[in-house]
Amino acid sequence: MGGATLAAALAPSGRRIVILERGEKLEPSPEARSDVAIWGRGHYRPKELWLDGAGEAFNPGNYYYAGGNSKFYGAVLARYRAQDFSPMRHMGGTTPGWPISYDEIEPWYQTAEDFYQVRGALGQDPSEPAHSGRYNFPPVPDEPCIADFRARLTRAGVHPASLPLGVDIERWLAGGKTPWDAFPGCTEGKLDAETVGLANALQHPNVTLLTGAMVTRLVAGAAGIERVEFTRAGKAETISAPVVVLTAGAVNTAVLLLRSADAAHPTGLANSSDQVGRNFMNHNLSAVLAIHPLRVNTSVYQKTLMVNDFYLTGGPGGEPLGNIQLLGKISGPILQSDTPMPLALARWVSRHAIDVLAMSEDLPNPDSRVTLKEDQIVLDWQRSNWPAHLALVARLKAVLRKAGYPILLSKAFDRRTPSHQMGTARMGHDPRASVVNPYGQSHDLGNLYIADASVLPTSAAVNPALTIAALALRTADHILRGAT
Ligand SMILES: Cc1cc2nc3c(=O)[nH]c(=O)nc-3n(C[C@H](O)[C@H](O)[C@H](O)COP(=O)(O)OP(=O)(O)OC[C@H]3O[C@@H](n4cnc5c(N)ncnc54)[C@H](O)[C@@H]3O)c2cc1C
């Protein structure tokens, strides 16, 4: 999301841009719309194994294709709330605040929303930050069962709002009647880093995309990054450029910097602060299924509303609890892949359930980190703020009960799903406490920028992609203004 957006913003300048992407372009295939292939067989998952904090190997849900994780994303393109940029007291501690304010990032949010053609509506959400413009497209419509659910939530006393989404719903459904959340966007209905970001960048003759190009190491000299080493089709290659922007995602960006350690930088590149790999965050997420045994949910995609009544308050001392939004419609095979239910029961449950996601902020912690063990990736995610998440799930269940759903099932997402990974190369003014400055430029190496989820100082309780895109646009502007 960061890399493709940045490339698109730099491209009109005529500068020569080479994008090194380890994955290939996803092509349409029957698996792309198959819940059994995606959840049951893990068709698109990488072949690699990472270690968790206890040294146990796991296969991460981290995707390597042109367009990155956004190919699979739920396309929620939401802004952080204005309050998220200042220190905030949570049940699990106080967040540090950002080195930039909401007002500074707001124009970039607006540009990112325009660029990704976000569908949405203003004025429905009590926690909504100020917008300088409008959404250019109306929200993706609620399906009939979700319109009924929205009315029930309103009667239960909360304020449902349309989810801001990067989905052209007619084009998506023309490719198959499925949800889009966690299904890869191979047709053009999902507005993601490939169909929008890369597609725009590649319209310019000065932009080259090399797929299957696995970056292995950055080599630094006295003046900054001197060359980038990568392998392609089994061959080792190198490339040099006046400006190098690292956008491999929060885990792999940290890994590349750590792997590039040399005699002058023994703990890794851009790491004089010792912050590379630290402060790893990933939201606390739970699925909550609201079941009424006599009502069938006929929705295909479902994912059109959110509730932010507990975003800024709701804890025992008025602390923030998080965001509530709909999941893509869960099917029997999806449910069965993550529970011991027999398929017939899973199908019955999914037919009668509205599937809701509870998302709470994970606070930065230097001991929550990405490291290497003999070149294998170690992701030691130390969850934080868990009581706030439990309080959010309890609040949500109370609302759902009031809205007329007698059976409520909930399950926390696996700690091995790093879908909202961020924070491993955080931005800040102080070179002793951060990896990059507020424009994404390395404090240590002047021609090195980072423009992905790594730089986010806090996770808020909002899906991260729009914030990553907004920051990447800001970084591109900084590069173009000749700051190096
Ligand atoms: C199932 C799922 C649902 C999600 N839903 C949402 C949502 O609704 N809204 C939202 O905001 N976010 C969502 N996300 C998260 C969102 O996709 C990510 O936050 C976002 O894509 C991260 O952007 P990024 O630029 O940091 O990294 P990525 O988009 O992951 O891009 C990193 C890129 O670097 C490439 N790469 C990695 N290592 C190397 C290397 N060594 N050499 C060359 N290339 C390399 C990767 O292949 C990839 O293309 C979801 C994620 C998943 C998995």
Image: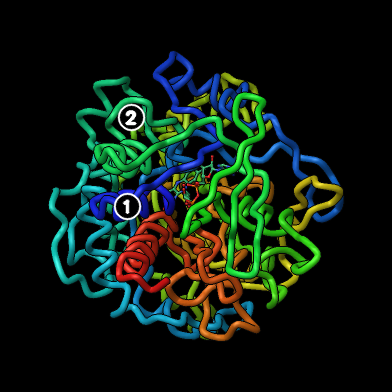
Vertical order, 42 against 2 (above or below)? above
Tell me if 374 is positioned left or right of 455 in this view: right
Residue labelled with disc 2:
300
Q: Position of residue 345 (x, y in %)?
A: 57, 24
Task: Kindly give the residue lying farthest to the top in the view shown.
Answer: 30
Q: Which mark is residue 225?
A: none
Q: Residue at x 27, y 72 (%)?
A: 106
The type of residue carrying mark 2 is Val
Q: Is residue 141 visible?
A: yes
Q: CA distance from mark 1 to mark 2?
A: 44 Å
Tell me if 58 is positioned left or right of 224 in this view: right
Q: Position of residue 243 (x, y in %)?
A: 46, 59
Badge nearest the viewer, 1 or 2: 1
Residue nearest the viewer, comparing 114 with 208: 208
Of marks 1 and 2, which one's residue comes earlier in the chain? Answer: 1
The quadrant holding residue 442 is: bottom right
The quadrant holding residue 235 is: top right
Give SS at disc 1: loop
Give SS at disc 2: loop
Residue nearest the viewer, comparing 138 with 63: 63
The quadrant holding residue 184 is: top left
Tell me if 373 is positioned left or right of 109 in this view: right
Task: Kindly give the residue lying farthest to the front in the view shown.
Answer: 222
Q: Position of residue 38 (x, y in %)?
A: 54, 25
Q: Residue at x 49, y 82 (%)?
A: 97
Q: Residue at x 68, y 51 (%)?
A: 415
Residue labelled with disc 1:
15
The quadrant of the picture occupied by the C terminus is bottom left
